[in-house]
Amino acid sequence: MSGAGPSLQEIHAPESVCFGCGPANPKGLHIGSRPEGDSLVATFVPEKHHEAFAGILSGGIIGCLLDCHSNWTAAWALMRASGAATPPFTVTADYHVRLARPAPATGPVTLRARPVEVRADRAVVEATLEAGGKVCATCRGTFVAVGPGHPAYQRW
């Protein structure tokens, strides 16, 4: 939902039904990750049903936003590192979310993620969720490229 032009999800996974980032999921969050320097950035505008309570974004939604955006950051970083034209299929190996302060659900939130370690088949990503210029949540995770035989292979 941020920036001009199509997101990585729209370019590389237009048929994906992932709840967080799938363009083809009519009830999904539709995260749209776009490159900005060595990072990916996305903007998400919460709706009333994304609230934990009046005016505050659900921690579960925050986790989903950070997970999907970070996963795409890893796939993008692996694609760039290998010189490939398309990103590999990646899955979350682990991620940890720290909720630093309540995130308002009354306006847009910004997701920023950057790879901090890239190996042949995995990337470690650090991400933030910001609202009103303040970091409300942080995330660090490891995301792994999968191949044939894995249930997620060619699924997004």
Image (cartoon, helix red, strand yellow):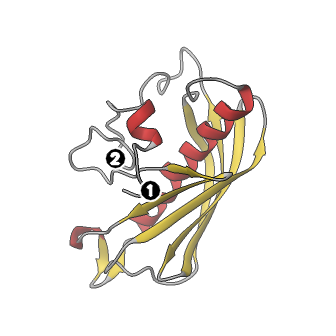
Q: In the picture shown, does residue 82 fall above or below 104?
A: above
Please identify the quarter of the rendering in which residue 95 is found.
bottom right
| Disc ID at residue 116 | none
> Is there CB contact under 8 Å for labels 2 and 1?
yes
Please identify the quarter of the rendering in which residue 112 is found.
bottom right
Neighbourhood count class around disc 2 (C-alpha, 10 Å): few under 14, some 14–19, many 20 upward: some
Residue tagged 2: 19
Which mark is first along the chain, 1 or 2?
Answer: 2
Q: Position of residue 124 (x, y in %)?
A: 71, 48
- SS for callout 1: helix
Residue tagged 1: 64
Real-space Cα separation, disc 2 to disc 1, in angstroms: 8 Å
Judged left or right of residue 65, residue 117 is right
The residue positioned 63% from the left and 49% from the top of the image is 94
Image mark count: 2
Q: Position of residue 45 (x, y in %)?
A: 33, 67
Neighbourhood count class around disc 1 (C-alpha, 10 Å): few under 14, some 14–19, many 20 upward: some
Q: Position of residue 84 (x, y in %)?
A: 64, 23
Which quadrant, please, contains the N terminus? Answer: bottom left
Frontmost residue, 58 versus 86: 86
Seen from this angle, which residue lies furthest top? 148
Which quadrant, please, contains the C terminus? Answer: top left
Judged left or right of residue 87, residue 107 is left
The residue positioned 34% from the left and 77% from the top of the image is 107
What kind of residue is marked 2? Phe
Q: In the picture shown, does residue 143 fall above or below 133?
A: above
Please identify the quarter of the rendering in which residue 114 is found.
bottom right
Frontmost residue, 40 versus 29: 40
What kind of residue is marked 1? Cys
Q: Position of residue 36 (x, y in %)?
A: 59, 54
